[in-house]
Image (cartoon, rainbow, N blue to C red):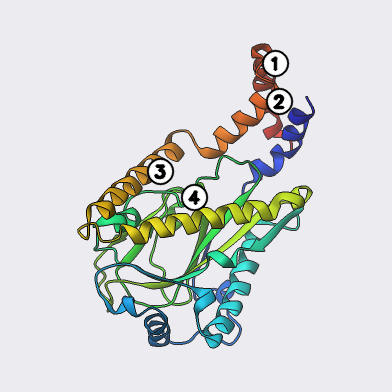
Amino acid sequence: MKAAALSLALLPALVAGEQATWCDKKDACATVKGGLPKPAWWEKELKKMQPACEEEGATCHQWTSLLSDKAKGVLDNVLTTVETKIMEGSKTKQRNRVLRRNSQMDELYLSAPRNSEGSDRVFITPHIDGFLGWLPFFTAYRCVYGLTGPHETVTIQPMRDPDEQEVNVGPGDFTCFDYNREIHWIEHRAQANATLDDRMVLKLHFYEFPAIFSYIGDAFGDANAQYNFFARAAFLASQFPDKDIISRLIARGINGITLFGGSAEAVFGYMNMGIALILISAARGKGQTMLTIAGTCHFAVYIP
């Protein structure tokens, strides 16, 4: 029953929830030390490091670890700004939790919301990005930080407050969501003042965990990164399905998994499944014990 007691002790933190974040460029939370380079500078940086991005009509990615030294300096200041906002929003220190950067996952990214071919279809399909949401008490954040605009790409976040469910992330704006649990997608929406069809953003990553789990916290961060590397490799292999039959098959597999992942979160919730696994494990599969725990543990949510 020790495992059950630990679960109950941690439930108040679980109920408090990891707070997702939206910050408008006009707000104090968006202030970046030294300011941001102009959109044209970021476009030049991406195309210099990734010549394939010159080709229009598809998404394009570049790991930030491969960017120029100047870009890395700007990136560090942006990370500090976003990190501070997350810690304030989720009350990280007050809840005795630890927030760390997962920079190996960070990338400079050009979206193509009009493209629905191959693995690019993923981005316009309601989806979650990772599959570790069944682990309670651990959170991975993906933050989308705007670099260009005005554009016609809208991020849909149906699990948010009404005023954050549809956001157009322009230069200096950013939104952060749960990498493993929060459903989202992008759409092309005509905007009267838009000068761009696509958008360029930084995808920044963090992970958070209870301080008492510090001995395994980094393993959680690395697990998310390894999954992301695998998914990226599969994505690139299937981005253009007309190239060959292998690309076509991989694209169908990715799109099928995307539909399943988003549907499972919407119907069951990976956090719920994780808690159920903990309770089953604590009861060692004994029916009467499982009923006893399930019938009483929900009272923990009323603990202030």
Residues at marks 1 and 2 touching, judged by CB atoms closer than 8 Å: yes
Mark 1–mark 3 CB contact (< 8 Å): no
Nearer to us of marks 3 and 4 is: 4
Q: How many marks?
A: 4
Residue toward you, 184 or 41? 41
Residue labelled with disc 2 = 282
Give the percent coordinates (x, y) of residue 81. Answer: 61, 73
Rate crowding at label 4 as few (under 14), some (14 to 19) or many (20 or more) other CA atoms within 10 Å. Answer: many
Label 2 CA crowd tier, 10 Å (few <14, some 14–19, many 20+): many
Which amino acid, by three-letter code, is at mark 4? Gly
Q: Residue at 60%, 78% (x, y): give it.
A: 76
Q: Which residue is mark 4?
A: 130
How far across and how far down the image is residue 167, in percent?
40, 62
Give the distance between the C-alpha atoms of the residues marked 1 and 3, in whole angstroms: 32 Å
> How far apart are labels 4 and 2 at the CA level?
26 Å
Give the labeled residue for mark 1. 289
Q: Is residue 248 left or right of residue 25?
A: left
Question: Which residue carries the number 3 mark?
Answer: 262
Task: Locate the N terminus and report the quarter of the image it occupies.
Answer: top right
Q: Secondary structure at mark 3?
A: helix
The circle drawn on residue 226 is: none
**Sequence order check: which comes first, mark 4 or mark 2?**
4
Earlier residue among tags 4 and 1:
4
In this rendering, the answer to whether 6 lies above or below 228 is: above
Q: Residue at x 79, y 28 (%)?
A: 2
Asked whether residue 20 appears in the rendered view, the answer is no
Q: Earlier in the sequence, mark 1 or mark 2?
A: 2
- Secondary element at tag 2: helix
